[in-house]
Image (tube, rainbow, N blue to C red):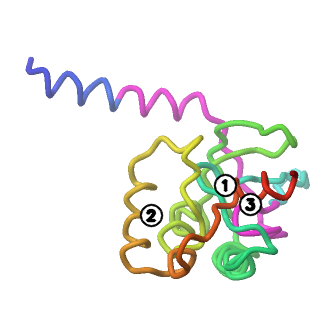
């Protein structure tokens, strides 16, 4: 067995196991708070606040904050979303990958230039590739030179 095949097999096995360890929830999107946070209503009538994993959208008061929220709202509001939950954050929100109408909202927000890859948490190369494409097109947050990333903006607001 070649090393390349062995590495590929290990990668696939890890991907499968990580999915098995993840919870999956679904429900109707009833609220979009900003470009990376929404609320779903499950079939059991439970409201679950979801933070989109691996991305960080501009804050409401930042340039493109409203555009980012509008983008996520148009993509997801009123649809039945599927969420692969990866974690729970310190605010009690589920953190996960959100699919609306078959579109991965997390990735699409980055692709549209309406969210940064959250370097601290992102692990998948596809997010970095999408961000690179958005940068090259100079769209959204990449149309403004040196726009402060949301995580730095929040930190500066606290000081």
Please give left or right for residue 8 compared with residue 33 in the image. Answer: left
Distance Cα–Cα, label 1 vs label 2: 16 Å
Instruction: Kindly identify the residue that appears in the image at 40 percent across and 54 percent down.
Output: 126
Instruction: Kindly identify the residue that appears in the image at 81 percent across and 74 percent down.
Output: 61
Distance Cα–Cα, label 3 vs label 1: 18 Å
Please give left or right for residue 120 compared with residue 12 in the image. Answer: right
Q: Which element type, helix, strand or loop, lies under badge 2? A: helix
Residue on which the image places disc 3 = 153
Q: Which of marks 3 and 2 is in front?
A: 3
Q: Are marks 1 and 2 in contact (CB under 8 Å)?
A: no
Residue on which the image places disc 1 = 52
Residue on which the image places disc 2 = 131
Of residue 138 and residue 107, the one placed in the foreground of this image is 138
Mark 3 / mark 1, whichever is N-terminal: 1
Q: Nearer the viewer, mark 1 or mark 2?
A: 2
Mark 3 / mark 2, whichever is N-terminal: 2
Mark 1 / mark 2, whichever is N-terminal: 1
Residue 130 image point, x, y percent: 42, 64
The answer to if 16 sits in the magenta stretch is: yes
Q: Are marks 3 and 1 in contact (CB under 8 Å)?
A: no
- Which stretch did the figure color magenta? 13-39
Of residue 52 and residue 144, the one placed in the foreground of this image is 144
Residue 118 image point, x, y percent: 59, 51
Q: Residue 84 carries which label?
A: none
Label 1 CA crowd tier, 10 Å (few <14, some 14–19, many 20+):
many
Residue 157 falls in which quadrant of the image? bottom right
Of residue 156 and residue 19, the one placed in the foreground of this image is 156
Please give left or right for residue 12 compared with residue 110 in the image. Answer: left
The answer to if 67 sits in the magenta stretch is: no
């Amino acid at each position: 067995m070649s090393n390349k095949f062995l590495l590929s097999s290990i990668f696939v096995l890890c991907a499968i196991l990580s999915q098995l360890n993840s919870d999956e929830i679904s429900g109707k999107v009833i609220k979009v708070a900003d470009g990376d946070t929404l609320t779903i209503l499950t079939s059991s009538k439970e409201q679950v606040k979801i933070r989109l994993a691996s991305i960080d959208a501009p804050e409401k008061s930042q340039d493109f904050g409203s555009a980012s929220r509008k983008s996520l709202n148009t993509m997801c509001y009123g649809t039945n979303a599927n969420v692969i939950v990866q974690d729970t954050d310190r605010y009690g929100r589920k953190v996960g990958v959100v699919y609306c109408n078959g579109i991965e909202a997390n990735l699409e927000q980055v692709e549209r230039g309406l969210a940064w890859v959250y370097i601290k948490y992102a692990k998948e190369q596809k997010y970095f590739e999408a961000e690179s494409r958005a940068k090259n097109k100079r769209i959204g947050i990449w149309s403004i030179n040196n726009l402060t990333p949301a995580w730095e903006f929040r930190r500066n607001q606290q000081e």
